[in-house]
Image (cartoon, coloured by chain):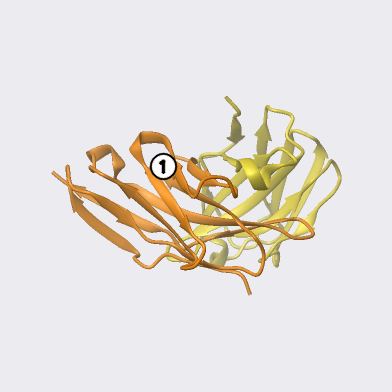
Chain colours: A yellow, B orange
Amino acid sequence: DVKVTQSSRYLVKRTGEKVFLECVQDMDHENMFWYRQDPGLGLRLIYFSYDVKMKEKGDIPEGYSVSREKKERFSLILESASTNQTSMYLCASSSPTGAIYGYTFGSGTRLTVV
Amino acid sequence: AQSVTQLDSHVSVSEGTPVLLRCNYSSSYSPSLFWYVQHPNKGLQLLLKYTSAATLVKGINGFEAEFKKSETSFHLTKPSAHMSDAAEYFCVVSLKTSYDKVIFGPGTSLSVIP
């Protein structure tokens, strides 16, 4: 089975801190994605990457950046955490035909910014 | 504009009775359609997918969905609810544009009453 592993299940950070959320997949997938999940809003795409060192903005990139130095690892960075970034963050990966076969998701990181 | 609507934010059924979770989409493209399930504290799991083959799609755990192009709908059904079906369900549209654009619905929370 494809595994997408997110390094932390729960995180509590202070306002203004720089926060790193890590995601690793073990199936050599080209595509990786970061979403945030909020009640009543479903999942919203923050950033995605189709290749190493490549990144594209999603629908809500403001306040975030990403890094993909290796194919299996996709990091989400909150440059200066704010309370409105308190949310569940989900990482996903897929093969190049991901639109057909769907995504594999990690279990999520619940981030609280105080 | 493309969008996904899940008509009910919460559905409650008794164990052993049918389940109907409704999804409508709006798209200028020929979409692929998915249903995902998220159990508490777990990642999203693919239930089933429609990719322009048979309009009635069978998924895991006894779920199925029917693609109706004339109604732009992709409702999820199950003949008999089980306690383990209690979860959040997301309808997802994937569009083959310049990249694989994926749109999540807001989610429907399913409760199963013993």
Image spot of residue A64 (x, y percent): 70, 60
> Residue A17 versus residue A21: which sits nearer the camera?
A21
In this rendering, the count of numbered labels is 1
Residue found at the far bottom of this picture: B1
B96 vs A42, left or right, is: right
- Going by the numbered disc 1, the residue's amino acid type is Asn
What SS does tag 1 mark?
loop
| Residue found at x 69% / y 50% | A76
Vertical position of residue A30 compared to residue B66: above or below: above
Image spot of residue A106 (x, y percent): 56, 39
Q: Which quadrant: the C terminus of chain B?
A: top left
| Residue found at x 49% / y 62% | B105
Residue A87 appears in the picture as rendered: no
Image spot of residue A4 (x, y percent): 61, 34
Image spot of residue A20 (x, y percent): 67, 47
Residue found at the far left of this picture: B114
Vertical position of residue A57 compared to residue B42: above or below: below
> Residue A97 versus residue A27: which sits nearer the camera?
A97
Report which residue position mark 1 lands on.
B41
Q: Chain of mark 1?
A: B
| Residue found at x 59% / y 29% | A3
Q: Quadrant of residue B62?
A: top left
| Residue found at x 57% / y 24% | A1
Characterize the local packing of mark 1: few (<14), some (14-19) or many (20 or more) Cα atoms within 10 angstroms.
few
Q: Which quadrant: the N terminus of chain B?
A: bottom right
Residue found at the far top of this picture: A1
Residue A53 appears in the picture as rendered: yes
B9 vs A49, left or right, is: left
Vertical position of residue B94 compared to residue A62: above or below: above
